[in-house]
Image (cartoon, rainbow, N blue to C red):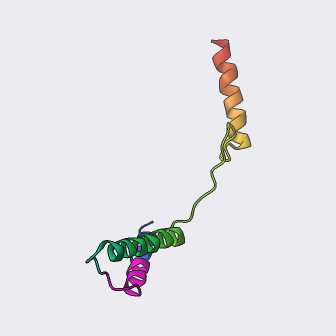
Amino acid sequence: MDNNWDSFRENMKGKLGKGPAMNMKDETRSGHTIGFILQALMSSYKDYFPLKFVRAGTYSVRWTHILQSLRKEVRLLFSKI
């Protein structure tokens, strides 16, 4: 994880270094500068921390057959109490 953050920071430095001069003297220039920084931030984050698919619903991808059989066993034992 730390390697991703280090790479992310280096990528941000590179992108910001290639950008326009950060001039905040008037509203138009500051808006352009903020937009550029935001775009660099979002693209760097997507490069090093890609989105992961999360399955919605009651079924969990991590719910294996072994866990399912253990769950049934525990429910049966609990029903007997």
Q: In the rendered image, which quarter is residue 63 located in?
A: top right
Front one among 81 and 9:
9
- In the rendered structure, the answer to whether residue 66 lies left or right of residue 8 reads right
- In the rendered structure, the answer to whether residue 34 lies left or right of residue 72 reads left
Q: Residue at x 67, y 31 (%)?
A: 71
Asked if residue 20 is positioned above or below residue 54 in the image, the reply reads: below
- Residue that extends furthest to the left in the rendered view of this protein: 25
Provide the major secondary structure of the magenta segment: helix
Front one among 12 and 79:
12
Q: In the rendered image, which quarter is residue 51 located in?
A: bottom right
- What is the number of callouts on the image? 0
Residue 38 position within the rendered picture, expressed as x and y whole percent measured from the top left: 42, 69
Residue 21 within the magenta-colored segment of the rendering:
yes
Residue 67 position within the rendered picture, expressed as x and y whole percent measured from the top left: 67, 39
Q: In the rendered image, which quarter is residue 18 located in?
A: bottom left
Q: Residue at x 66, y 47 (%)?
A: 55
Q: Residue at x 50, y 72 (%)?
A: 43
Residue 64 position within the rendered picture, expressed as x and y whole percent measured from the top left: 70, 44
Quadrant position of the N terminus in the picture: bottom left
- Residue that extends furthest to the top in the rendered view of this protein: 81
Front one among 57 and 36:
36
Q: Which residues are magenta?
A: 9-22
Residue 6 within the magenta-colored segment of the rendering:
no
- In the rendered structure, the answer to whether residue 1 lies left or right of residue 21 reads right
Front one among 17 and 45:
17
Asked if residue 60 is positioned above or below residue 73 in the image, the reply reads: below
Quadrant position of the C terminus in the picture: top right
